Image (cartoon, rainbow, N blue to C red):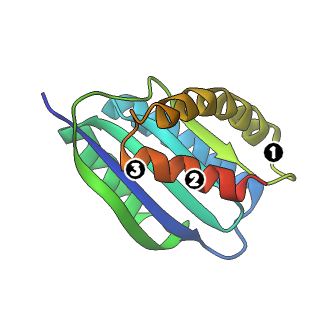
Amino acid sequence: MSNRAVAYVSTAVSGLTPAEVDHLLVDARAHNQLAGVTGVLLYDGHHFFQYFEGPEEGMARIYERIRNSRMHVQLRELHNGPVESLYFSHWHMGCSLTDGSVLQKISTQQWQHEVGNLQDDVAQDAASPALRELLAFWQQHAQ
């Protein structure tokens, strides 16, 4: 079974509430787990950056859900292709919003733990360009 990774950026719809972001977080975790897909979704209050990876069939299902979501517009794909190995063992979310919910704050803490590993791989030149863009987005928007 071959694995694939996708990275994209999109613009959140205007007026997206913390409760809607919580629903997105819970819903995505459930669907991704069923499809065997992992990765990270970053949200800065205006934009999403998502990197997700997994088996071809599960990726196709999840990507279709993402493209049909009404929570964002202007989806711009940065990477879509096969990967030799999976980088994330769990699905994470990072929010740079200071007024996010408790769920978002907990998710962000989990993601911040993962950032250290990603930074190490980027420093060692072991990360893919898509993962480098993920880290750059977080560093730029988490200020």
Identify which residue is drawn at 33% across, 53% down.
63
Please report the residue visible at 26 percent of the width from the left and 39 percent of the height from the top: 58
Give the number of the mark in front: 1 or 2.
2
- Quickly name the residue at label 3: 130
Q: Residue furthest left?
A: 1
Badge 1 element? loop
Residue placed most toward the observer, 14 or 93: 93
* SS at mark 2 in the image: helix
Amino acid type, label 2: Ala
Task: Say what amino acid the circle numbered 1 marks.
Answer: Ser
Mark 1 surroundings within 10 Å by alpha-carbon count, few (fewer than 14), some (14 through 19), many (20 or more): some
**Does residue 128 sit above or below 13 in this rendering?**
above
| Of callouts 3 and 2, the N-terminal one | 3
User: Who comes first in sequence, dot 3 or dot 1?
Assistant: 1
Between the residue at mark 1 and the residue at mark 2, the CA separation in whole angstroms equals 24 Å
How far apart in space, not on screen, are marks 3 and 1 (Cα)?
28 Å
Q: Foreground mark, 3 or 1?
A: 3
* Residue 136 numbered tag: 2
What is the number of the mark on residue 101?
1
Are discs 3 and 2 less than 8 Å apart at CB? no
Q: Quadrant of the N terminus?
A: top left
